[in-house]
Image (cartoon, helix red, strand yellow):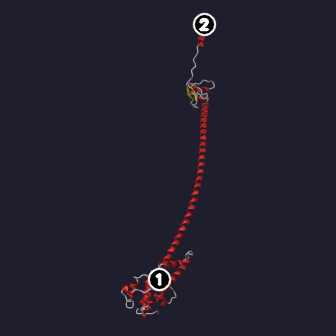
Amino acid sequence: MTTAQEDSPSQTEASATTTIPITESPINRCKHCKQKIEIGAHKCHHCASYQNKNIQLAYICPSNRLHRNDVYSYRPSLVKFQSAGRAKKQRITASDALEKAEQAKSRAQLASNAIERLSQDMNLLYNDAKSRVDRLENITKEANGAIADLKAVTDFTFILEEAKTDSRKALEDLFNIANSNDKRFSQFAEKSLVQIFTSTHVEGLIMPNVNWSKYNLEPDKASLEQLATAFYTEVPYTQVRMLYSIWNQSRFSKYDKISFLINVVRTTQSVKCLHQACKLLEQEAKTGKNFMAYEEFLQWWDKHKSCYRENDRSC
């Protein structure tokens, strides 16, 4: 007994003098907050959560001792602890969701501002483009108006020159312009018609002799058909004299001579011939009109030709 007792202190001293080397523990992560902790640590120094559920339940127990049969006696505390953990996770999740929602709201606001600025820029571009298009349309209208005016002046000048060169069609166009509502040219057309009428009347007083011999015709013996054939082959200047020569043939009936003149009025393209034919018809028609009213001579003949056919005179 004595030996045993003496050995005990020496063993205690030996054990007391024994040194345990301190080594740095490896790193692990907490099962709850996922922060770095030492491997083998029972409790996280960040969130104070126990890594072993049994140890956690044991610390919940007031006597710090837990037996299998005593677990159910501390069930309410365990449920409360678990509910607190879930609530904490929910708060963290809700906080993250709120933060994400705020970030999404901020991004949406930025996008909305960008869209608004883009819309304003597009409106400015649209208004500028519309203004340019309107100005272009106005310029186009003015240009088209100027082109139309130039064309009208050109056409009128052409008609006037054609009428001066013995064109019956140009004379009729000039007559229509004089009777139109176009104040730009109507008055000038009237003056031009007066000049043409005066010059045509003066030219009609100077009639050249007709060279019938080149047609092998004697005007006092040839038939009206032969004279008419020769007439339609000549130029207007000579046709004027031919009309006068045919009209003065007393051996032809008035019906035949007037029929010939009426045909000339309907078909000739010469103002001079039209003037001379209407002048000769006026001797019988007595309308008081000149060649510019040639249609009245045609109407007169339609009304009186039956009498000329039967009686060789007007009824």
Question: At numbered mark 1, what does the secondary structure look like: helix, strand or loop?
Answer: helix
Question: At numbered mark 2, what does the secondary structure look like: helix, strand or loop?
Answer: helix
Tell me if mark 2 has few (under 14), some (14-19) or many (20+) residues whose alpha carbon lies within 10 angstroms of its own. few
Q: Position of residue 33 (x, y in %)?
A: 58, 32
Q: Where is residue 7 in the image (x, y as percent from the top left)?
A: 59, 8
Q: Position of residue 275 (x, y in %)?
A: 48, 84
Number of on-image labels: 2
Q: Earlier in the sequence, mark 2 or mark 1?
A: 2
Q: Is residue 298 visible?
A: no
- Residue hosting label 2: 6
Going by the numbered disc 1, the residue's amino acid type is Lys
Is 156 in front, or is 98? 156
Q: Distance between the residues labelled 2 and 1?
A: 173 Å
* Residue 26, above or below 120: above
* Residue 172, above or below 149: below
Quadrant that contains the N terminus: top right
Please give left or right for residue 207 compared with residue 20 in the image: left
Task: Give the quarter of the image for residue 103.
Answer: top right
Q: Position of residue 217 (x, y in %)?
A: 37, 88
- Residue hosting label 1: 272
Going by the numbered disc 2, the residue's amino acid type is Glu
- For the residues carrying marks 2 and 1, which lies nearer the camera in this image? 1
* Residue 155, above or below 272: above
